[in-house]
Amino acid sequence: MRVAIIGAGLTGLTVAYYLKKAGVKFDVFENTEHTGGVIRTKSKNGFVYETGPNTGTVSNVETVKLFEELSGSFEPELADERAAKRLILKNNKWVALPSGLTSGITTNLFTLKDKLRLLGEPFRKPGTNPDETIAALVRRRMGTSFLDYAVNPFISGIYAGDPEKLITKFALPKLYRLEQDYGSFIGGAIKKSKEPKTETEKKVSKKIFSAEGGLSELTNALAENTGYDNIHTGKNVIITRQDNHYKIENSSYTHVVTTVNGGALNGLLPFIGTKELKPVTTMRYAKVVEVSLGFNKWNGMDLNAFGGLIPAMENKNILGILFMSTLFKGRAPEGGALLTVFAGGIKKPELATLPETELIKLIKPELTHLLQLNNFNPDLMEISYHNNAIAQYEAGSQKRTETIKAIENKYNNLFLAGSIRDGVGMADRIKQATRLAETIISMR
């Protein structure tokens, strides 16, 4: 057995890590000159910032286990408890998202009608449409104001997407299963909380994580434990198939794992027809521009929160702002602040292609007002453009999933992984990679 892994991001490196532990031979091929994929941490003038994903969530047992195994070479840093406070913009003012019964009753984010309507949520019948969008589901069970001022900004934060287009079953599978398995969100959450859990399951805290020094510490630890001799960067490979084996340059492999975006599969796997791959290669991705802002001395609003999300109803150019120096230690000089601002997404993709000067000219007035700054004069500003930032699980997700399964059944020992299926979060990547590695190891 010899495995080729395409992509040295979080998914590929996690697969490689577990194969190495099991003594399975493998090679990782990465077309850029560095490991880590889109995860990139930079340090400049006392600021430690990300130019890709900023945080993850400890939301499954696979993530818990990986962190425990990497102990000594990687230590997760959990977000400050102030991260529990989430801000939502309404009528140009920040409002804290309710965190309990009292704040849920008194908040002005939701209408009285929808607050009363929520009392009947546990008694509504489950939906019967497997292709129901997130927006349709939330309207049906909770009401329009919950969609506009809770779910819409939440979806912007995860997918930079449109809840009118995202399919609940694929984009929010846990929410979908709550309704299907338990009959309601509220009742299901209560019942699940009472189910017995293993000791590892009890450690699934759902807390936000990074690492001291940034998220690159995670992918660096995986690469070091995997062995850099097994990782080949700067390799834009093409895979051919011959006699049930796969060829890359002059090497032969029994198994192949791809972790690339859907659009890259045609060039990578030419032995599969473009028509056969079309449901995967035509998957839509959100374009996002990420702006890291550092201030040596902060003189704006109180940053005592996770950050602020902006609903589409507010008609701003900014999707949201993360208060990174509040969440994690050492991200900015003492008395300063580090923020990450996001723009673009599915609804305003044109913003993610603007030249830097035009982008800043557009978002500067919004940032100055929203952050209550006397003047906008950051000591650090770095802009990162992501053309294929986040996969969108929209209509066609069922067909795409079926296509992936059919291709894997047709071409023995070929596995199509990455964010084309199974979720877009860091914990989703770890879970998928762990289970994929277990499958390959069991085939020896």
Image (cartoon, helix red, strand yellow):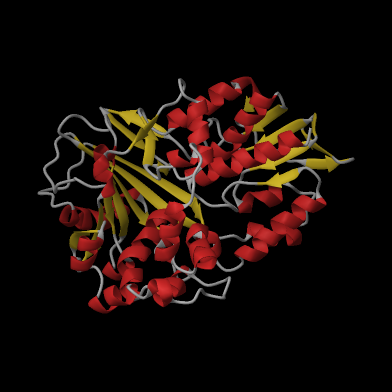
Q: Position of residue 47 (x, y in %)?
A: 28, 31
Q: Position of residue 105 (x, y in %)?
A: 21, 67
Please state which of residues 308 and 129 is positioned toward the viewer in this rendering.
Answer: 129
Image quarter of residue 72: top left
Q: Is residue 359 left or right of residue 139?
A: left
Foreground of the two, 190 or 35: 190
Residue displayed at 42% across by 59% down: 189
**Residue extending furthest right?**
243
Camera-nearest residue between 356 and 388: 388
Location of residue 395 by image quarter: bottom right
Rendered position, 399 above or below 86: below
Q: Residue at x 28, y 48 (%)?
A: 84
Q: Quadrant of residue 434?
A: top right
Total numbered labels placed on residues in the image: 0
Could you tell me if residue 345 is visible in this image?
no
Residue 245 in the image, given as x and y percentages of width and height: 84, 38
Whether residue 60 is visible, yes or no, is yes
337 with respect to 177 (left or right): left
Query: The N terminus is located in which quarter?
Result: top right
Q: Specify the quadrant that holds the C terminus.
A: top right
Residue 108 screen position, x and y as percent: 19, 69
Q: Residue at x 60, y 37 (%)?
A: 12
- In this view, the residue in front, 437 or 11, is 437
Q: Is residue 165 above or below residue 21?
A: below
Up/down of 330 relative to 274, above or below: above
